[in-house]
Image (cartoon, helix red, strand yellow):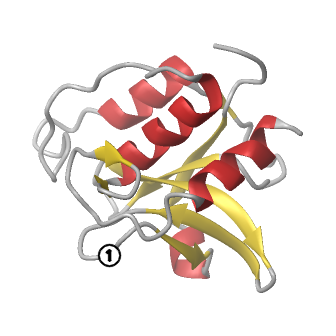
């Protein structure tokens, strides 16, 4: 089974985990980064890196793309125009001019494309990849194949 398929299976195990800022514990709490970190641990058995403390506004005051930079340290970028595939990690910019500060793992359900993510006020959920969400994607990444 390819790593993307394994990532979706791992992410679905997190569905229902309550939203908890900076957390990454399946069943106890996670934010969007915590979900991706947890899936990484499920895939590779270790933590990719321990993130520093971060606020809900991420790096908006400084304008630095800290989440994007972290993704580039551990994940493989997907070229613009390449197929959107389940298991890819999507990075979202939630508002024009803001930094990219939301992550989700792309999936496919019986209703079409979706993504698994955690966001404030919700548990980890699998949402349809509707047009409003899709247009916010600024980058996609894949988990590396093999052991890390």
Is residue 85 left or right of 36 when viewed as pictured? Answer: right
Quadrant assignment, res 66 = top left
Is residue 12 left or right of 86 when viewed as pictured? Answer: left
Is 146 rendered above or below residue 113? above
Tell me which residue sits at (54%, 41%) in the image. Answer: 39
Is 37 rendered above or below residue 100? above
Pointer 1 residue:
122
Residue with the most extreme right position = 1
Q: Position of residue 95 (x, y in %)?
A: 32, 65
Tell me which residue sits at (52%, 79%) in the image. Answer: 132
Around disc 1, counting alpha carbons within 10 Å, would you say few (fewer than 14), some (14 to 19), or many (20 or more)?
some
In which quadrant is the N terminus drawn?
Answer: top right
Q: Position of residue 125 (x, y in %)?
A: 48, 72
Is 140 rendered above or below residue 40? below
Tell me which residue sits at (77%, 19%) in the image. Answer: 146
In which quadrant is the C terminus drawn?
Answer: top right
Q: Nearer the viewer, residue 87 or 67?
A: 87
The residue tagged with tag 1: helix, strand or loop? loop
Q: Position of residue 14 (x, y in %)?
A: 49, 58
């Amino acid at each position: 089974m390819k790593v993307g398929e394994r990532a979706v299976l791992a992410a679905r195990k997190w569905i229902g985990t309550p939203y908890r800022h900076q957390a990454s514990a399946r069943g106890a709490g996670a934010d969007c980064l915590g979900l991706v970190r947890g899936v990484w641990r499920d895939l590779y058995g270790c933590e990719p890196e321990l993130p520093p403390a971060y606020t809900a506004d991420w790096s908006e005051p400084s304008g630095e793309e800290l989440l994007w930079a972290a993704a580039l340290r551990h994940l493989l970028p997907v070229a613009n125009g390449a197929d959107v595939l389940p298991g890819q990690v999507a990075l979202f910019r939630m508002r024009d001019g803001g930094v990219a500060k939301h992550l989700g793992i792309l999936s496919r359900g019986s209703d079409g494309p979706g993504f698994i993510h955690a966001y404030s006020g919700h548990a980890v959920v699998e949402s349809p990849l509707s047009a409003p969400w899709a247009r916010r994607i600024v980058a996609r990444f894949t988990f590396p194949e093999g052991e890390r």
